[in-house]
Amino acid sequence: MTRYALTRLGLLVLGLVVASALIFVSLRVLPGDVAQLVGGTQASPDQVAALRESLGLNIPLWQQYVEWIGGLFRGDLGTSLLTGTPVVTELVAKAQVTLPLAAMSLIVALVVGIPFGVLSALGRRHAGGTALSVGAQALAAVPVVWAGMMLVVVFAVWLGWLPPQGFPRAGWNDPGAAFRALILPAVTIGVVEGAMLLRFVRSATLQAIGQDYVRTAAAKGLTRTRALLRHGLPNVGLSIITVLGLQIAGIIVGAVVIEQLFTLPGVGRMLVADVAARDLPKVQGELLAVTGFVLVVGFVVDLLHRLIDPRQREAS
Amino acid sequence: MSTLKRLWGLGTGRFGILIVVLLVVVAIVSLFWTPFDPGAVDVRARWADPSWPHVLGTDNNGRDIASLLMAGTRTTILVAVGAGIVASVLGIALAALGSLTARWIRESVAVLVDILIAFPVLIIAMMISAVWGGSLAVVIWAVGIGFGVNIARVTRPELRRVLQSDFVLAGRASGLTAWQNLTRHLLPNVAPVFIVQLSWGMAVAVLAEAGLSYLGFGAPITQPSWGVLLNDLQAYIAVHPLTVVWPGLAITLTVLALNLLGDALREAGDPTLADRAPAARTHVPGVVA
């Protein structure tokens, strides 16, 4: 286990290095002069040259990269070109919207995916189970933005139960309003991701049904459903952990899109605005933070999986 | 031929084929004819309800929604095919590098693929579009790179397996060059796995076009595209909710068709699967939609 954890940790560090290098290089080597971008088309050559110096663009590329990474260890991801605020400060502020949104979406996805996935597998010979499976197929094909729009039309415009857009100015100081503002976005992401999870849980459960130990337990007098619940599902749960890692990445990406639709002041909306404004130092820091988060989640999920599943430990 | 017949025999396969053919036909027809000029602004016909001659109604500029949707199929197909080509070339190249070369190259490529696979397509799109600005090329490259890595991940073990098989050894023994062996034995045997992945990848591309165009990283607003249309109409959903329904339905139907086609291709390629539990589709992290 320790050996696996160390190897996996090495892969994580390598992943972070590759990610940071890719982000850094792609934002600099691709055609386009950052100083010119910042200065705008009106800037004179002198102004652009001065900007280049103040942005530290005139020193060698590798040195810029080393400085950026060095800053990272001091908790400094650089500062915004446009507002002058440190990227870290803004990330922390915006994460207070995005992380609760992601957590709520995950809960919705689990509630949709796991019980209905098992039900759909158990009822595979009945109309209900088939309907669940077909419905999940269709839902997994729905664009998240569109699902969000439809939910807004129904629950905000027609029924008037929830706010159609926005986040309270007071933020989490007004917890009720903040929570209500996140319900529709979280349901949107959660239902679409949950539909994908449902498909996976369904096929994992179907596989478990065919396993010998479930059949044995059934032969010894348990009903098939009980045999499955007691002996099959713990094994299904294990394979779900891996999928959840991917699911969380999907939820983070879904949040970027859905924050735009619901005008939520989160990391995703900030990222989209910064890319549009070409605030490159900020985009660079934000991209690294988001990618880093996804990589770390993958690492934790892998470790967790290995820790719980003894068969994998023996296999190594 | 028998694979195609089996594919048609599966309900999901038939549905997938029909929708894909329909899309291609609509795209071709839209080159010569649409009910109205998709870009034509007609302020007198703003927000027309669905009725003749505007069968799906009009938008805030009086543009005919049915015509916009028809013209949008071209963008969808362009992105799906473009991303498919990028993903195929990259995926096959990485899979080949990861199985046919020296050991240290093979292992480095495997690690690289493992790392790249964690990059959501949206992040790649943002990296490209931060410098280039939004365009369809951004979508094609982002999905192509994101899904190409996925294809490599799935195709590589398959390629390695075929590499160990008797007929490849026999081919080598009978004096085939590496290239002849590759084209005659390796690629045809890997093709089934690869084609299934490709159809799923194209579904991802269609969703990504919609999502990225919606965010402003994809098609320019002047281009007829389902994603752009969603973005255009979003501001009016409270008053004209019906108009937004159509582009969303078009996207969902297309993605569903490609997904089901992939499932059916998989089943048709391996008849023994029909009796077994369906395997989960490779889940692409960070499908933008």
Image: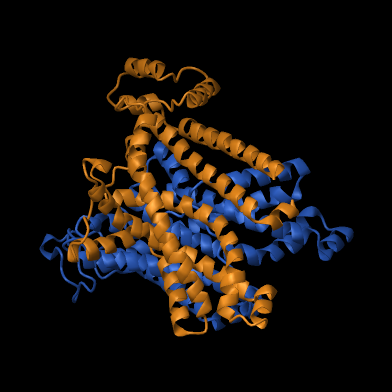
Chain colours: A orange, B blue
Residue B37: % across, % down? 25, 63
User: In the rendered picture of this protein, how many numbered marks are placed on residues?
Assistant: 0
B200 sits left or right of B246 in the view: right
Residue at horizontal 51 percent and vertical 72 percent from the top: A118
Question: Who is closer to the viewer here, B269 or B282?
Answer: B282
Q: Is residue B75 visible?
A: no
Residue B231: % across, % down? 28, 54
Q: Is residue A78 above or below residue A192?
A: above
Q: Is residue B242 above or below residue A221?
A: above
Residue B49: % across, % down? 16, 71
Residue A148: % across, % down? 31, 59
Q: Single out the residue that lies furthest toward the left.
A: B44
Q: Single out the residue that lies furthest toward the front.
A: A221
Q: Is residue B275 above or below residue A231?
A: below
Residue at horizontal 59 percent and vertical 74 percent from the top: A228
Question: Who is closer to the viewer here, A136 or B70?
Answer: A136
